[in-house]
């Protein structure tokens, strides 16, 4: 590494669970790129200052995570068309002082779902959560023409906003509900795929789950985008009920690879990144 290293970083809070620095630094090294990736804990009320700092220090690329993906839009110079439609950004490129926002979460999740051979066309999809990741994933799922998408969220207004924007942008049939046991029981009766897009179950609160076990049925596919731990309470319950499961690892690696390409212009070494993530996640939980 030389003094003129290109710095990339993650901003979010919490970030203690993140494995992004390991994934990206391993990939930069593998390809001999003079880049380095750091993670910064940035509190909600410090986001504006953090973005000013990015500009001042000429940081090359950013990942943005919980809770800043939506708020960060207002500090950017340009936003890619898809990220604009989604209304959330998880990747920023600093192109000679112009900060441009992108979203790689939705495409990363869709790649993970397709890899498991799940065809979304005409399926009934339930998404728990209505934050940055939920918006991106719901948008990409809607493009696959499912029969229906239902969004359940702790704050029903946020679910309603997301459902409205999806109907407007994609013309898919989409409804919103509050996240509680009664609504879950009713909604999951005819669901084919459930995706958890809340942090419930994420380290260190690993006993939490967004969906009580008795609401799960064995013919459903359950995806949890929480990746630390890899086997969340939700996925353990789903396995016990007999559901197929998809953990957050593939989405994590896919979205990272798409961000990597945006910053470097180079195709990411997907398998190198996957191995690095898996190694650290397995080690942490053993
Ligand atoms: P976000 O924008 O802050 O959204 C969080 C969502 O979770 C909101 O809908 C929020 O509901 C809900 N929520 C938060 N705490 C809750 C609680 N205690 N009970 C019920 N609902 C709660 O965050 P995000 O960026 O979408 O990330 C969400 C999770 O996905 C995080 O754990 C993150 O690490 C993970 N993630 C994984 C990947 C991957 O590649 N595998 C990628 C992106 C994100 P309200 O609207 O009521 O606040």
Image: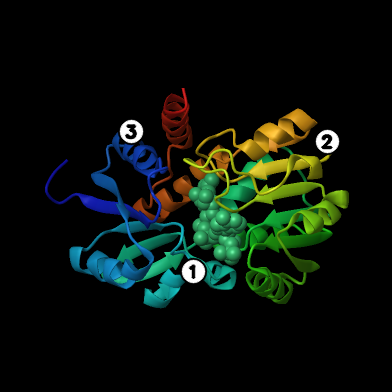
In the image, 84 versus 246, the foreground residue is 246
Q: Residue furthest left?
A: 3
Q: Is there CB contact under 8 Å for labels 2 and 1?
A: no
Residue behind mark 2: 218
Label 3 secondary element: helix
Visible residue check, residue 104: no
Vertical side of 182 occupied by 168: above or below:
below
Which of label 2 and label 1 is nearer to you? 2
Q: Are marks 3 and 2 in contact (CB under 8 Å)?
A: no
When the figure is inspected, residue 255 is found, relative to residue 136, above or below; the finding is above
- Disc on res. 30: 3
Q: At 77% from the left edge and 61% from the top edge, which residue is drawn? A: 149
Q: Is residue 24 above or below residue 10?
A: above
Name the residue located 42 percent from the left edge and 77 percent from the top edge. 74
- Give the residue number, with chain letter if any, for mark 1: 70
- Density class for disc 1 (Cα within 10 Å; few <14, some 14-19, many ≥20) is some
User: Ligand 1 appears in which quadrant?
Assistant: bottom right
Q: Mark 1 or mark 3, which has the lower sequence index?
A: 3
Q: Measured from the top left, where is residue 66 in percent x and y?
A: 46, 58
For label 1, being within 8 Å of ligand 1 is answered yes
Q: Is residue 59 left or right of residue 260?
A: left
Of marks 1 and 3, the one in the foreground:
1
Q: Of the numbered discs in the image, which one, if any, rests on residue 231?
A: none
Compute the Cα span from label 2 to label 1. 35 Å
């Amino acid at each position: 590494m030389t003094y003129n290293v290109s710095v990339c970083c993650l901003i979010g809070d919490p970030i203690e669970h993140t494995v992004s620095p390991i994934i990206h630094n391993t990939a930069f090294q593998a390809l001999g790129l003079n880049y380095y990736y750091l993670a910064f804990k940035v509190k909600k009320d410090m986001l504006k200052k953090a973005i000013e700092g990015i500009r001042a220090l000429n940081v090359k690329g950013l990942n943005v995570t919980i809770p800043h993906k939506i708020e960060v839009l207002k500090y950017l110079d340009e936003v890619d068309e898809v990220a604009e439609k989604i209304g959330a950004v998880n990747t920023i490129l600093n192109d000679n002082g112009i900060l441009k926002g992108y979203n790689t979460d939705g495409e990363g999740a869709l790649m993970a779902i397709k890899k498991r051979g799940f065809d979304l066309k005409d399926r009934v999809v339930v998404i728990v959560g209505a934050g940055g990741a939920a918006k991106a994933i719901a948008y990409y799922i809607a493009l696959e023409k499912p029969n229906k998408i239902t969004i359940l969220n702790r704050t029903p207004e946020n679910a309603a906003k997301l459902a409205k924007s999806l109907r407007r942008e994609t013309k898919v049939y989409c409804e919103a509900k509050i996240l509680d046991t009664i609504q879950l029981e009713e909604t999951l009766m005819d669901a084919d795929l459930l995706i958890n897009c809340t942090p419930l179950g994420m380290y260190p609160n690993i006993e939490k789950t967004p969906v009580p076990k008795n609401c799960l049925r064995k013919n459903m596919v359950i995806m949890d985008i929480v990746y630390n731990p890899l086997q969340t309470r939700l996925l353990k319950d789903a396995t016990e009920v007999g559901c197929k499961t998809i953990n957050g690892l593939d989405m994590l690696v896919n979205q990272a690879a798409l961000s990597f390409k945006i910053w470097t212009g180079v195709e990411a070494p997907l398998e190198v990144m996957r191995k690095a993530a898996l190694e650290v996640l397995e080690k942490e939980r053993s």
